[in-house]
Amino acid sequence: MTTVTEIAPDVFSICTYIEQIDLQFRQFLIRDEQPLLFHTGTRRTFERVRDAVGEVIDPASLRWIAFSHFEADECGALNYWLQEAREAKAACSANGSLVSIGDYAFDKVRALGDGETLTIGSHRLRFLATPHLPHGWDAGHLYDDTSGVLFCSDLLHHLGDVAATTTESRVAAMKAMLESSRGTPMDWYIPWTPQARARLERLAGLRPRVCATMHGSAYVGDGAAELRSLASMLEEVYGAAAPAP
Ligand SMILES: [Fe+2]
Ligand SMILES: [Fe+2]
């Protein structure tokens, strides 16, 4: 089942729970003059995500399809969306556009530079390039200045069929997920690079009111404190004291 929940004014979370892996996959829709979808979901789930978008807007009216990095859950259904919404363009990092999306999406892409803003009507979005955070050379984060929602991709990823939002920190839940993935293909999910803490600190500096993860509940509260706590947890799990890969 795919559900739709408004998590901030005109910001909707679309959720599909996959029981076999005890994991939610969420896309976020901003309803505005130029509607924007953050994450497409996989090709397999395209129809159900399209129908969920259709509960809020005409799916063909979508203008922007944004995401953090090139992976199936982030943008696998991108070309299906570009066929559905003929005026839409992908919006991703300049690096992502250069390396993958320019080719993958037949140049229907707006490459966003670090710090660049994208105004889609009343919502003003800011793009921050964050290479290798959460992972991938092309990774970035999108922040909605208007609603205070940080679309934080795989940061704060946790398991379970959980509510769309929570005021309880997600850091311990993510730590439990990372620890349970030791020795599995999901190990080393987030590379702790020399730049990772500074990149998380930069996201914290946005002081988001909502940290909207792709996998699990969006955290509502002091987003800066949540992201700093996340940085400390990731350093503990993946930093210098971590076991060799
Ligand atoms: Fe990812
Ligand atoms: Fe993901």
Image (cartoon, rainbow, N blue to C red):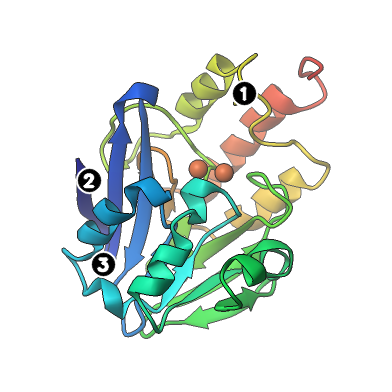
Whether residue 75 can be seen here: yes
SS at circle 3: loop
Q: Left or right: 32 with respect to 193?
A: left
Residue 240 % position (x, y):
82, 24
Question: Label 3 is placed on what type of residue?
Answer: Pro
SS at circle 2: strand
Q: Residue at horizontal 58%, vertical 17%?
A: 179
Q: Is residue 110 above or below residue 148?
A: below
Residue 160 % position (x, y):
34, 27
Image disc number at residue 9: 3
SS at circle 1: loop
The numbered mark, 1 or 3, whose residue comes first in the sequence reads 3
Q: Residues within 10 Å of mark 1 (few under 14, many from 20)?
A: few
Q: Residues within 10 Å of mark 2 (few under 14, many from 20)?
A: some
Q: Residue at horizontal 66%, vertical 73%?
A: 115
Mark 1 C-beta closer than 8 Å to ligand 1: no
Residue 79 % position (x, y):
46, 65
In the rendered image, the quadrant that contains the N terminus is top left
The numbered mark, 2 or 1, whose residue comes first in the sequence reads 2
Q: Is residue 71 above or below residue 99?
A: above
Question: Label 2 is placed on what type of residue?
Answer: Thr
Q: CA distance from mark 2 to mark 1?
A: 27 Å
87 vs 235, nearest the viewer: 87
Residue 194 quadrant: top right
80 vs 229, nearest the viewer: 80
Q: CA distance from mark 1 to mark 3?
A: 37 Å
Q: Residue at horizontal 33%, vertical 40%?
A: 167
Look at mark 1 in the image and give the residue it sits on. 185
Look at mark 2 in the image and give the residue it sits on. 2
204 vs 158, nearest the viewer: 158
